[in-house]
Amino acid sequence: MVRAAVLPAVGSPLEITDIDLPEPGPGQVRVRLAAAGVCHSDLSLTDGTMRVPVPAVLGHEGAGTVVSVGEGVTHVAPGDGVVLNWAPSCGRCHACSLGEVWLCADALTGAGDVYATRSSDGSDLHPGLNVAAFAEETVVAARCVLPVPDGVPLIDAALLGCAVLTGYGAVHHAARVREGETVAVFGVGGVGLATLQAARIAGAPTIVAVDVSPEKEELARRAGATHYVVASENTAREIRALTGRQGVDVAVECVGRAVTIRTAWESTRRGGRTTVVGIGGKDQQVTFNALELFHWGRTLSGCVYGNADPAVDLPVLAGHVRAGRLDLGALVTDRITLDGIPAAFETMKAGKGGRALVVF
Ligand SMILES: [Zn+2]
Ligand SMILES: [Zn+2]
């Protein structure tokens, strides 16, 4: 029996309750969580913006220690530190064969499975986003665990599983920021802070952070922002003024709202690139007229899990951590327990704070 945060139904508050996990079957691994980050996608699952079968144990950004492994699992062993990968690729589908593992057609297999039961009544539970990290322990498919690279503390490693992989990948894979290019980052939450640090690693001389809250300036500057803009209807104009009236080379949108996507696009120079990382709802319609698409020659692209291959990128990120270029602790503004997750959701809804990290 372990404690877990269960979403009983879309729109219902989380329940912190005891659950029963099975021993890992063939191809499965049981992990004791060290830490789990509270990501905006967890909130999107509670309000129905994103959907998974319920009741589900949420949490998808985690790291921990392998407790036991099922038959056929050879890449990790009990006692190993692992990062959870919520979008494990199959290696066989068309996207995987092209190396675009983040778009794997089979990545979410298992989301509909029952993986645990509620201790109170024996009812079935699903793993939200495959890994169910908001629990003291979890049982996942072997391809959902990657060894923690050397030199990264286990608790900090949790952040590599979503926020950092996403922010780093948005800059280095999706937008392909080159040294000397200017970058604007919209939304200074966990992913936004990771994106700012990634822009600094890429060698961007001007990094503009944009957020609705004036209170996040210090957090943003510590992550690498050279300028801070409080979001308003003048945001695009302010960013152009900071970049010789041109606009930035690259904008990364970490909010998922139509108005922010449109502003990010308008903040880029002619020929600039905008990468949308934020996950918005179907009601968020962004419009462009045909003439401006021609005139500005800009690129707008989506980004899934940082367009990253975790197996390749985690060792690279660890290298940046060891060299002191990537500060994982700087993303965390609140260290909480499982019981603190509902309050962390409220903080997130209010647009406050960076990453809340559940430490077990
Ligand atoms: Zn996430
Ligand atoms: Zn695949």
Image: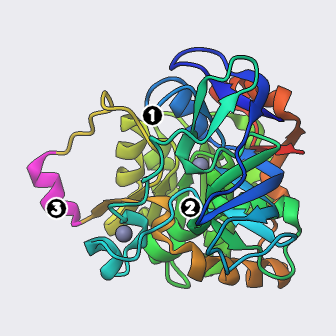
Circle 1 residue: 233
Residue at the image position 67 percent from the left and 65 percent from the top: 70
Relative image position of residue 116 (x, y in whole percent): 65, 37
Closer-to-camera residue (39/300): 39
Q: Quadrant of the C terminus?
A: top right
For marks 3 and 1, the one nearer the N-term is 1
**Predominant SS of the magenta segment:** helix
Circle 2 residue: 166
Residue type beneath disc 2: Thr
Mark 2 nearby-residue class (10 Å; few <14, some 14–19, many ≥20): many
- Give the mark toward the camera: 1 or 2: 2
Q: Are marks 2 and 3 in contact (CB under 8 Å)?
A: no
Is residue 198 visible to us here? yes
Relative image position of residue 254 (x, y in whole percent): 52, 49
* Separation (CA) of disc 3 from disc 1: 22 Å
Q: As displayed, is residue 322 above or below residue 155? A: below
Label 2 within 8 A of ligand 1 by Cβ: yes
Which element type, helix, strand or loop, lies under badge 1?
loop
For marks 1 and 2, the one nearer the N-term is 2
Is residue 246 visible to us here? no
Relative image position of residue 265 (x, y in whole percent): 35, 53
Closer-to-camera residue (178/29): 29
The part of the chain drawn in magenta is 289-297
Circle 3 residue: 295
For marks 2 and 3, the one nearer the N-term is 2
Which element type, helix, strand or loop, lies under badge 3?
helix
Q: As displayed, is residue 313 above or below residue 51? A: below
Residue at the image position 80 percent from the left and 27 percent from the top: 18
Q: Are marks 3 and 1 in contact (CB under 8 Å)?
A: no
Mark 3 nearby-residue class (10 Å; few <14, some 14–19, many ≥20): few
